[in-house]
Every structure is written in structure tokens, then in C-alpha cells.
């Protein structure tokens, strides 16, 4: 199920992503803040499983309460839980399968599993290939051990549906070319020379607040003539560099362009895109293979990027500019996400981030594991068997840890509208018979083979869930008092 969050400023968020929901909540209790940080840590480490990690932590804390009431010392519980987490990671690794990054279908199946619980799950068939292809294009499959997701630029554009989203091998800007009302310039430029500049093409302003007093028309005429001369000189230097497309960084001090500079540039056949965010400068420079220029005097042909096609398109009543066929491109891509309204668009962006993180997890640890609650049941049974081989309180603590692991399939069955006790009992029986890949089929309400249904997820997601949840619980467990200070 999804949650609707209304912020103090009236903004509304609809999501079922654990990290998103917790980050919007105002929590005051120190332990609750630790659980929020736990969800953030899972989001950073694996990008998925942010809800499950909190559910597991809650189940482990409940188990700790029962153990403490039975008189077991917190230190003994903490040590036993640490041992259980290590053993659980070993069990998960044993039942996992290696994956080849060249096997695109398996990667897409993994991403589909992640998106199946999202608000935009019906569009998983469209977003999953986009997420997989975008990551594969920015890494070297043979040697990569991580993925810099900053190399994948996500641009959101209102209008259309999520099915209209696309992967662009180049750059996308969610606005059209800047132009004056009288300008009629072409919307397509071939063999474009692109300059990325960090200065403004408008009249200069004084460094401090000042007033200019004009007493006659002659003085006004001189000012306008000097302004025209100054801007024309800037435009001529841009033209001399060979650039025919300008990307101008947003400035808070003065306008990036004015009608006069846009008029001159249009006459010279130069198209302009303004309001480039400072955070995007590095990505754009890497993609185009150009250098950002902060002063007109340093704008030379060597600092320009080259692209085969720069095109302005109208999508859903809004204009976008695409730069493709880049010569000497960097290892970056852009994803244009479409949506019918702002709520859907924002959730699609968050879901796409989770999808990218799933592929990143497979790059970091190239193993797959089945979903549907199967790994947690397997861990529970193996840990319970291992606990029986130990002596003393450790055996009892491991049994409690194993029971806590069953919270995931129990909650999954409950959310699917099934009878959780009956489903989990049947799932236990299947795993006891050696069917380690049997999990909950939420669509049919039965126990099915998860590998046959292609319900797969990265091993890193499961291992980090258990490891991070256990670390958080052990930290809380060792706290015996709260000291309030001013």
C-alpha cells in the first residue's frame, strides 16, 4: 500500500518508498531517529529494501524485549545477534546465483521485481530496460566494481505518460531555445559547436548599489549606444570562437541574456539555452567533452564540444532540447521521464532511482537471489538449526533471531491480502523439504518457485538489510539510560 504525505507547505507526496516516507516524518525520539538513519543507510548502500530493513529491525527489537524479560543480559544478546548476522550472510551467499552483467534479461527481471511494489508498477516493462541500459552504457562491464549514478542524468518533463519516457545518449534540457518574439530561427542544428559558458551576455551591473542620474536625451542615447556596443562585442567574440549553440549557467546577479543579445545571436545563427544549473555543469562538460568558460576572453575553439544534432522538440505542449550524436562523448547518459501530473512524475523519478540502484547493487556484488520471502525463510530455518548446535543463552538468542526473520514473508502475505499464518507455515514446509527457491506468489496467492517467475533481486540488498538492521539493534540494545542535557 502507498502513503500520502502532506508537508507543512501544502506539498503532497504519494510514495511507498521507506526512505522517502521516513525522511519526511518529524521524529523526536532519539531511537526513532536511529531508525530513520538506518533507512537512509540502506538507501545509500543498496538503494532498495529501505522498508524491509526497518521491518527487520523492529522484529529484532521485539525479540530483544522478550529475551530481556527472560533475564538474558544485553551483552549476551548482542554477541549472539552479531554471530547470527554473519551466519545469515553466509546462508544467503550459499543460495545465491552468480549473474553476468552481459545477461540483460536477468538484470531486467531484477529491476522488474524492485518496481513491482511501486506506484508506477504497471510501467515496469518500460522503465526497467531504460534503467539497465543506462547503467550498462556508463560502465565497463568487465572491470566495473561500482557505478557513479551522477553519470545518469534524470530530467523530468510534465506531459504525456510514463510510457513516453526514453533513454537519450546525450543531453536533454527541459526547456526550449531562448529567443525574442521577433526571432524565427531553425529548431534543428546539425554539426553543432557547443560552448558552455559561466558569464552573462547582458549589460554589466555595478558591484555596489548605485544610482545613475540622466539629465538629457543625449546622455540616454549614449548609454544605450554603449550598451549596444558592449553586447555586440560579446556576441562577435562568441561568433569568432565558432560556437553556434550556447549553454549559459544560471546567474543570480543579473540576467543571463537580454532581448538585444538574443537578437544579435539569432542574426549570427547562434542558438541559446539559459538557466543551466551549477550542479549540472560538470555532467554537461563531461558529456560534451568541452570545458566551461568563465570569461569571454578565454572562449576558444578548443574549449567547444561537438554534436551531430541539436534539436528542439515539443512534447505534451512543452519544449525540450536534445543534444545527440556527440563527438568524443563522456560515459554519461540522460533519461527523460514523462508524467501526467507532478505527483506521478516525482514518484516515477524516485522509482527510477531505485531501479538504477538495483543495477548498481548487481555491479558491486554480482549475485542474484530469489524474492518472495524465500531468502528470509531459508535464513530462519538454517539459523534455527545452527542455534540448536550451540549451548547456553546463544542458542536461545539465535532461535529468536531466526523467528524474527519470518516477519518479512509474514508482512508480504498480509499486504497481499492472504492469510499470513497459513502461508508462512506452508512456506516453512516447502523449505524443510529442500525447495529453497519457493516463495510467496502475491498475484495468485500461492507458494511458487521464484526463479521460474523471475522474481529476483540482488544479493547485496538482502545481506545489507540484515547486517545494517542488526548493527542498529545491537547499538540500541547496549543503551541502558537516556541523559537529558541543556
Image (tube, helix red, strand yellow):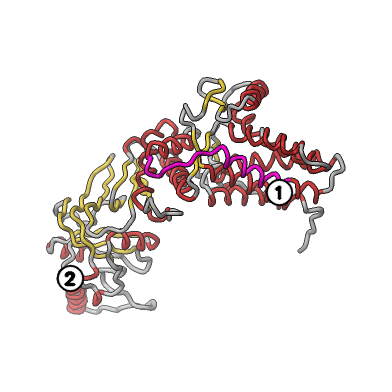
Please give the residue where the numbered disc 2 appears in the rendered image: 241
User: Under tag 1, what secondary structure?
Assistant: helix
Q: Residue at x 36, y 47 (%)?
A: 134
Quadrant of the drawing holding the N terminus:
top right
- Mark 1 surroundings within 10 Å by alpha-carbon count, few (fewer than 14), some (14 through 19), many (20 or more): some
Q: Name the chief secondary structure element in magenta.
A: helix
At which x and y percent is residue 417? 59, 23
Of residue 131 and residue 351, the one placed in the foreground of this image is: 131
Q: Residue at x 15, y 65 (%)?
A: 264
Of residue 418 and residue 248, the one placed in the foreground of this image is: 418
Q: Does residue 332 belong to the magenta stretch?
A: no
Stretch in magenta: 81-103
Mark closer to the chain start, 2 or 1? 1
The correct choice, above or below, for 282 with respect to 134 in the image is below
Q: Quadrant of residue 276?
A: bottom left
The correct choice, above or below, for 457 with respect to 269 in the image is above
**For this view, does 319 lie left or right of residue 48?**
left
- Mark 2 surroundings within 10 Å by alpha-carbon count, few (fewer than 14), some (14 through 19), many (20 or more): some
Disc 2/disc 1 C-alpha distance (Å) = 63 Å
Please give the residue where the numbered disc 1 appears in the rendered image: 82
User: Under tag 2, what secondary structure?
Assistant: helix
The correct choice, above or below, for 30 with respect to 267 in the image is above
Q: Does residue 93 belong to the magenta stretch?
A: yes
- Residue farthest toward the right in the current orientation of the protein: 71
At which x and y percent is residue 95? 56, 37
Q: Quadrant of residue 70?
A: top right
Of residue 45 and residue 426, the one placed in the foreground of this image is: 426
**For this view, does 311 lie left or right of residue 211?**
left
At which x and y percent is residue 167? 31, 44
Tell which tag, 2 or 1, sits nearer the viewer. Answer: 1
Q: Residue at x 56, y 22 (%)?
A: 447
Amino acid at each position: 500500500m502507498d502513503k500520502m504525505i502532506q508537508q507543512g507547505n501544502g506539498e503532497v507526496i504519494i510514495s511507498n518508498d521507506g526512505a522517502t516516507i521516513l525522511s519526511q516524518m518529524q521524529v523526536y525520539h532519539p531511537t526513532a531517529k536511529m531508525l530513520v538513519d538506518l533507512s537512509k543507510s540502506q538507501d545509500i548502500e543498496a538503494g532498495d529494501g529501505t522498508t524491509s530493513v526497518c521491518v527487520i529491525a523492529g522484529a529484532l527489537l521485539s525479540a530483544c524485549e522478550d529475551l530481556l524479560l527472560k533475564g538474558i543480559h544485553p551483552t549476551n544478546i548482542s554477541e549472539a545477534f552479531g554471530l547470527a548476522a554473519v551466519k545469515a550472510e553466509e546462508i544467503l551467499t550459499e543460495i545465491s546465483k552468480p549473474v553476468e552483467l552481459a545477461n540483460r534479461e536477468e538484470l531486467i527481471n531484477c529491476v522488474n521485481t524492485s518496481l513491482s511494489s511501486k506506484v508506477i508498477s504497471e510501467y515496469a516493462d518500460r522503465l526497467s530496460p531504460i534503467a539497465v541500459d543506462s547503467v550498462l552504457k556508463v560502465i565497463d562491464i568487465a572491470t566495473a566494481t561500482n557505478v557513479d549514478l551522477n553519470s545518469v542524468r534524470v530530467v523530468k518533463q510534465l506531459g504525456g505518460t510514463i510510457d513516453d519516457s526514453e533513454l537519450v545518449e546525450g543531453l536533454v534540457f527541459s526547456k526550449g531555445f531562448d529567443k525574442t518574439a521577433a526571432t524565427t530561427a531553425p529548431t534543428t542544428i546539425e554539426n553543432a559547436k557547443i560552448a558552455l559558458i559561466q558569464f552573462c551576455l547582458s549589460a554589466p551591473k555595478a558591484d555596489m548599489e548605485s544610482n545613475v542620474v540622466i539629465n538629457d536625451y543625449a546622455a540616454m542615447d549614449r548609454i544605450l549606444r554603449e550598451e549596444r556596443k558592449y553586447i555586440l562585442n560579446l556576441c562577435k567574440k562568441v561568433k569568432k570562437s565558432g560556437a553556434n549553440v550556447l549553454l549559459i549557467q544560471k546567474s543570480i546577479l543579473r540576467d543571463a541574456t537580454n532581448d538585444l543579445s538574443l537578437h544579435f545571436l539569432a542574426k549570427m545563427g547562434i542558438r541559446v539555452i539559459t538557466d543551466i544549473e551549477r550542479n549540472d555543469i560538470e555532467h554537461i562538460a563531461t558529456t560534451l567533452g568541452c570545458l566551461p568558460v568563465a570569461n569571454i576572453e578565454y572562449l576558444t575553439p578548443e574549449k567547444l564540444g561537438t554534436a551531430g544534432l541539436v534539436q528542439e522538440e515539443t512534447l505534451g505542449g512543452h519544449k525540450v532540447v536534445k543534444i545527440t550524436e556527440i563527438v568524443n562523448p563522456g560515459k554519461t547518459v540522460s533519461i527523460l521521464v514523462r508524467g501526467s501530473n507532478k505527483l506521478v512524475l516525482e514518484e516515477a523519478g524516485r522509482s527510477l532511482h531505485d531501479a538504477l540502484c538495483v543495477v548498481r547493487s548487481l555491479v558491486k556484488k554480482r549475485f542474484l537471489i530469489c524474492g518472495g520471502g524465500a531468502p528470509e525463510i531459508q535464513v530462519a530455518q538454517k539459523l534455527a538449526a545452527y542455534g540448536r548446535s550451540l549451548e547456553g543463552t546463544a542458542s536461545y538468542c539465535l532461535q529468536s533471531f531466526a523467528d524474527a526473520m519470518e516477519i518479512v514473508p509474514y508482512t508480504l502475505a498480509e499486504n497481499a491480502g492472504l492469510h499470513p499464518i497459513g502461508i508462512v507455515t506452508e512456506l516453512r514446509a516447502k523449505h524443510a523439504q529442500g525447495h529453497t527457491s519457493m516463495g510467496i506468489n502475491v498475484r495468485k496467492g500461492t507458494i511458487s518457485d521464484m526463479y521460474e517467475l523471475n522474481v529476483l533481486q540482488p544479493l547485496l540488498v538482502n545481506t545489507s538489510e540484515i547486517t545494517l538492521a542488526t548493527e542498529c539493534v545491537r547499538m540500541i540494545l547496549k543503551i541502558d539510560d537516556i541523559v537529558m542535557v541543556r
